Image: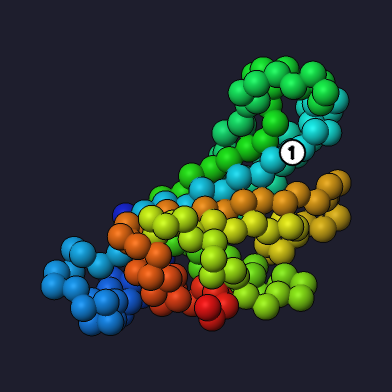
Amino acid sequence: MADSKNYTPRLQQKYKDVIQKELLATLNLNNVFEVPKISKVVINIGAGSESVSDSKKVNDAASALELIAGQKPIKTKAKKAIAGFKLREGMAVGAKVTLRKSVMYEFIDRLVNIALPRVRDFDGLNPKSFDGNGNYAFGIKEHLIFPEINYESVSEIWGMDIIINTTAKNDDEALALLQSFNFPIKKR
């Protein structure tokens, strides 16, 4: 990555120059500050019940997430003890990372243009995955779709949840925003 003061990701520049003006017209908004934008992206990997017996699995998941996101993740801990899973309160069970600003735009660009087209039998994202407040969440079954992951070094395949948080007032505005970023969302 170039000098961070002068560098603006391609997708962020496209949002400022093109997408913002298009959404202002299509959503019939009065002010440019009303136009919805993506505020953050949260990526979560759960290491599963195997992480109870082998703490190395959480570290492997965290290192894979660091490669994908380009930022160091935090390890998530169990909130409750569950005797059936031999899980104690406070044990590390996964990793998550929150992306904002330029790192977020870089990730979205790689996700939409490189990673999602590599998903096997992919026919689009579910349009019902909006939460009612303009946020979108979906899951990926294999972290191997990201080009940063080296196939030879992978010991286990991780699934991940990706949550896209927007400033949209409703799901229709959020859908218009994500479609303008070329998210492959199926038609309703």
* Residue under the image location 62 percent in, 31 percent down: 75
Instruction: Look at the picture and state if 86 lies above or below 184.
Output: above
For the question of whether residue 104 can be seen, the reply is no
The residue singled out by tag 1 in the image is: 47
User: In this figure, what is the number of numbered marks?
Assistant: 1
Place of residue 76 in the rendered image (x, y in percent of width and height, measured from the top left):
61, 31
Q: In the picture, residue 184 is in which quadrant? A: bottom right
Q: Quadrant of residue 25?
A: bottom left
Amino acid at circle 1: Ala
Residue 67 location, x and y as percent? 64, 50
Where residue 117 appears, x then y in whole percent?
66, 75
Mark 1 crowdedness (10 Å alpha carbons): few <14, some 14-19, many ≥20 = many
Which residue occupies 54% across, 61% down? 129
Residue 143 visible in the picture: yes
Answer with left or right where residue 44 lies relative to residue 42.
right
Whether 154 is drawn above or below 95: the answer is below
